[in-house]
Image (cartoon, rainbow, N blue to C red):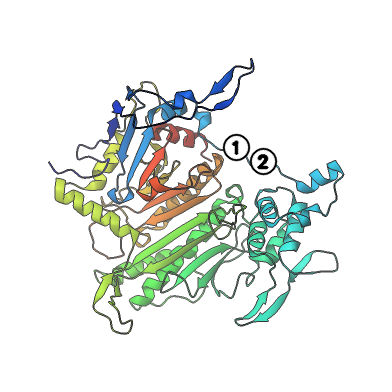
Amino acid sequence: MKQFPSCVGPDGRFQYGIHKPSYHAANLRASETIRQLGTLPDQTVLNNAANYPNENLKVDNADWIFEIPNAFPFRGTTFIDKVWADASADNYDRIGLPPRQEVSFSDLLARTGTDADLLEKLPAPLQLALATTSTDPEDLRRLAILSCAMDFADDGTPAGLLYQHGPRGARPVIHDHALYEAVANNPFLPDAYKTVMVLRPGAQGGSEIIGEWPQDGQAHVFEYLRRNSYIAGGHYAANMADDAVRYSIEALSSADMRGLRHLYYQRTYVGLAERIGISSPRRPLAQAELETLRKAILQKAGSGLPRVATLWGWNFGFDFAPSGYRLHASHQQIHQQYAMVPERVDRFTGDPEIPAGSLQAYSCGDMIATTIQDYRDLYGRDFFEDFLQAIINNRRMDGRPGLESELIVWQDERVMLFVPKAQTSQWELQLMTKKDAQGGFPGNVLEADSALRDSLDNGILYAQKVLAGLGARMVTSIEYAKRLDIGAPAVQPLLYAFLPRLPESPGAFSEAQLRFINGHYPEDFAAVCRRHLP
């Protein structure tokens, strides 16, 4: 019987496999090298003889492994080791990261009477490590001065960078680009240095500011156009302004989130209005004006709106390894990115001047649409109806009574924040729209009225606050949206995934195969998240 490769089943329950291994392993070794490993406190010598068995091996009752297909087949499969997960179920304190350790090299030099100039003499990899880990503003100030050429005011505060002419115009004089990025993105660097190095408009290049959530005493956000981006046709970034410094989720407020997201909604609605001949003011739109424009688009478009799609994402957090490998986003300052994806792109087979038809332009929401259709073709049922029922009916995989069984972290009448049964990041959360008054799922931001937009903004903020409360310092957030074709069946909700990057889960050969390894049950992670709701 053909099956759908998903943990969602047509009976409205989650389904998964359990490996209960017992097996034989033929011993094919031809030699042995017994060596001393060390000694115990009583001077008993330990060696590695146990690593060289003489017989074939028989493994009985090895650890159970849960194999949970992702709800969406294109996202792979999650594997949970029962022993690890049982330990986390018995002790929720295992689910979390320790707070950042205080590090001060300048203080160490002072306490030990060491030459204060030693910091400037450190090898470059050690300076880079200090730039990313120090919590001492003095360390970071000195590293900032090492990384680039600065201009200072009479009172000693940085006034700007020194520039020189190059083939592409004036460029700042940067002595060590990796050190420059690392120190400028450390939250403990004094704000005056952050401002001249990365925050002041123009400090990171000539990207034009073409939108703004004006300074209102609570938030201030600029919208930049990234002209020559890997996202073709208009790639925008909403960045906290230089007078609203936000380097941590703890500093992020609901007003900030409203401003960041407002610019995304505004850019999307204005872009759609232009496509169908609706004029809109060339100034920032108030919340009420935004809703009026959205309704006008829906009313005029009918079924004729182009099948474009939205693209939205957010990389929060920054880090460099001392070896020079960047570990996450391009900068720490809180920002979000968005664009519009066309329906199709010209196809070429060799000559870049002669198109040969067209291809469907990639949008990750299309893969969910395919999942919905494949599920209906096999079972004759709506995928998300069964998905939601499975969340409601959820039971623990380990069968232990008296422990948490709820996957929902937070919800209101319009959206649900929950832990997916199969997490592709060890701490993945998802946010999904619920059914509206018409009985369908709002599937994109055009279908989201002002109340739903508020719920989405709150849900995104809560997800970030919860993950930060657990110690996550690097989180990738993405949107899976239905294409903006009016009149399509409302069976695809708008979905967001929040994917933390953890210190011991960098991604390797398992993840390259879409095999995701986890050390806790999703129900226990949901319980821990509820403890950290703001």
Which SS class for mark 1? Answer: loop
Q: What residue type is labelled 1?
A: Pro
Q: Which residue lies furthest to the left in this view?
A: 1
Residue 253: x percent and y percent? 57, 51
Where is 423 relative to 257, above or below? above
Number of dots carrying numbers: 2
Q: Are marks 2 and 1 in contact (CB under 8 Å)?
A: yes
Residue 380 showing in the rendered view: no
Q: Is residue 3 left or right of residue 235?
A: left
Q: Which residue lies furthest to the front in this view?
A: 31
The image quarter containing residue 489 is bottom left
Residue 402 showing in the rendered view: yes
Which SS class for mark 2? Answer: loop
Identify the residue position indicated by label 2 in the image: 101
Q: Residues within 10 Å of mark 1 (few under 14, many from 20)?
A: few
Q: Which mark is residue 83?
A: none
Where is 277 relative to 34, above or below? below
Q: Which amino acid does label 2 sit on?
A: Gln
Q: Is residue 442 left or right of residue 49?
A: left
Residue 305: x percent and y percent? 28, 71
Identify the residue position indicated by label 1 in the image: 98
Q: How crowded is mark 2: few (under 14 residues within 10 Å), some or many (20 or more)?
A: few
The residue sitting at 84% across, 52% down in the picture is 116
The residue sitting at 79% across, 43% down in the picture is 108
